[in-house]
């Protein structure tokens, strides 16, 4: 759950139900992806290769070596 509702808008460009690393939609019992569930859908936050799918800076975390995949 996002602690700050404005974070939802900040991460919206990267919300995806498909892992951008393996191009699969994780199953509900999947242990290889980190997902966040909403009332509408399930979104991949960290992919199967342990890379951020969403921009960590949008959540107030250090960007590190994150690359924007959606451009």
Image (cartoon, grey):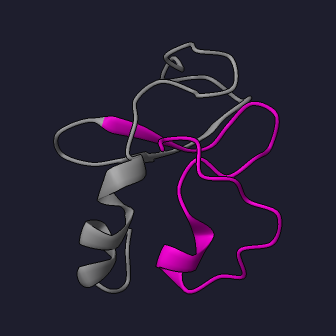
Left or right: residue 9 versus residue 3 is left
Secondary structure, magenta segment, majority class: loop
| Foreground residue among 7 and 33 | 7
Q: Residue at x 53, y 55 (%)?
A: 54
| For residue 16, above or below residue 2 | above
Q: Residue at x 73, y 59 (%)?
A: 66
Q: Residue at x 58, y 42 (%)?
A: 69
Extreme residue toward the left, this view: 40
Left or right: residue 63 versus residue 7 is right
**First to last magenta residue range:** 42-71
The picture places residue 41, in percent across and down from the top left corner, at 26, 35
Residue 52 within the segment the image draws in magenta: yes
| For residue 13, above or below residue 58 | above
Left or right: residue 23 versus residue 15 is right
Left or right: residue 70 versus residue 3 is right
Q: For the N terminus, which image quadrant? A: bottom left
The picture places residue 11, in percent across and down from the top left corner, at 38, 63
The picture places residue 10, in percent across and down from the top left corner, at 34, 71
Residue 19 within the segment the image draws in magenta: no
The picture places residue 43, in percent across and down from the top left corner, at 41, 40
| Foreground residue among 39 and 51 | 51
Counting the numbered discs, the total is 0
The answer to which quarter of the image holds residue 57 is bottom right
């Amino acid at each position: 759950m996002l602690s700050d509702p404005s974070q939802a808008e900040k991460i919206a460009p990267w919300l995806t139900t498909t892992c951008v690393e393996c191009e699969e939609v994780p199953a509900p019992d999947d242990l290889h992806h980190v997902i966040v569930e909403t009332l509408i859908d399930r979104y991949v936050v960290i992919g199967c290769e342990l890379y951020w799918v969403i921009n960590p800076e949008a959540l107030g975390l250090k960007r590190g070596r994150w690359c924007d995949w959606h451009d």
